[in-house]
Image: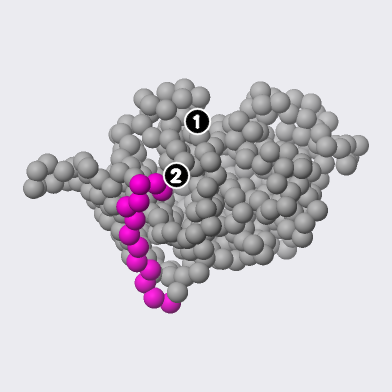
Amino acid sequence: MSLTGLQTPHSGYHWSHPGTGTGSRFFEGWYLRLTLPELGESFAFMYSIEDPQGGTPYSGGTAQILGPRHEYLCRTFPDVRLFWGDRHTLALCHSRRPLNPLNKGSSDVFPFTQSSISDYSLKQSSDRSALGSHQRSRASLSNDPGQFVYEGYQLTATHHQGILSEPGRHSARWCYSIQPVYGWGNCDRPQQSTAGWLSQFQIFEPGWQILMAHGLATGWVEWNGTRYCFSQAPAYAEKNWGGAFPQQWFWIQCNAFDGEADLALTAGGGRRRVLGWMESVGMVGIHHRGRFYEFVPWNGTVRWRVQPWGYWQMQAENAGHMVELLGTCDRPPTPIRVPTAQGMVFACQDTTQGKLTVKLWEKQGDRPTLLLQAQSHLAGLETGGDFSATDTRGYSNFWYF
């Protein structure tokens, strides 16, 4: 299927322009995951921009990476003028310094059209590097040799590259191409909003969209001087936007299952704000061998039991199918920063090496037929927000999500 056919709603950058909504907090964040099954490792890239109009205590950007062995890198981007995002498609970039020192202070630091950012130079040498031997510390952004990013990232639906260095700690460089396989929905139909059609009105706080449930990545990532080369490795992408993260949430993601190359799962739930009041919601989405199985409040019921850390259980049912998920993790989590009313703070805990079991049945009278049973030890598992010391249990079957 063409890339255009797999583009989901909400792929573009949501913030409009200076002068729009400057009285309210706003963030937009992107999460990209790259899994290396042969090594049992993952790279999770997390980008965010807060109060892009500037002039608030929280204005700025952040880039975080959860790398091998759960090592963690975080870098801030104080200047919101050096961020650029396309309003219509997945395309964004942020630099800690202007591309050209002569352009410092210019509002056109990233002079890209959509076509030029989609086609920016990713020329690879024999080692798949976009970094020339005489520019090992600078990543080329365009065909103009005078345009460089000294530290930052660039992302489109089909390319991802960047360079980050945390003084005295971790460093990372990466350059890889992406072949989307699944967006969010059946491949032969228009792609869907993860939160349903009402999400276009921005009544949910925050918004959430899976951009690519499954893709194949080819290229390299260099972490603390060690280069990881890969071909057709599982890739994933999603985003959030709004005023702040939910009051409480949990998340499950995996597209690297044992013996099931064509299987991708994303699930989550929690408490969020809708038109001024709080509600509990949950969902499960599965892409398997060309078919999309969706379990959401408007087509069925979703139940969950989640502990503050270590245990995630979900059961969901719609008119034709049933699903059960069980995720566990016996290692300590890695704290992650997320946007809040007080700015970026540690309010989330993650692993990319969780254990996950998925069972999917088709309803056939009184005896459901088991369609799928799969396991993985490379699941992304997360809890965040105000989790109590006891289990969190939930149920949702509202007509909207």
Give the spatial CA distance, label 1 vs label 2. Answer: 16 Å
Q: How is the image coloured?
A: one colour
Magenta stretch encompasses residue 396: yes
Q: Pointer 1: what residue? A: 7
When the figure is inspected, residue 370 is found, relative to residue 147, above or below; the finding is: below
Left or right: 386 as drawn, with respect to 341: left
The amino acid type, in three-letter code, at marker 1 is Gln
Q: Pointer 2: what residue? A: 195
Looking at the image, do the residues carrying marks 1 and 2 touch, with CB atoms under 8 Å apart? no
**Which image quadrant is residue 121 in?**
top right
> What residue is drawn where x is 45% and y is 51%?
39
> What residue is drawn where x is 47% and y is 60%?
278
When the figure is inspected, residue 41 is found, relative to residue 145, above or below; the finding is: below
- Is residue 401 in view from this perspective? yes
Left or right: 223 as drawn, with respect to 38: right
Judge by depth and name the residue closer to the eye, 9 or 21: 21
Left or right: 372 as drawn, with respect to 388: left
In the structure shown, which secondary structural element does the residue marked by tag 2 occupy?
A: loop
Judge by depth and name the residue closer to the eye, 276 or 192: 276
The magenta segment is: 389-401
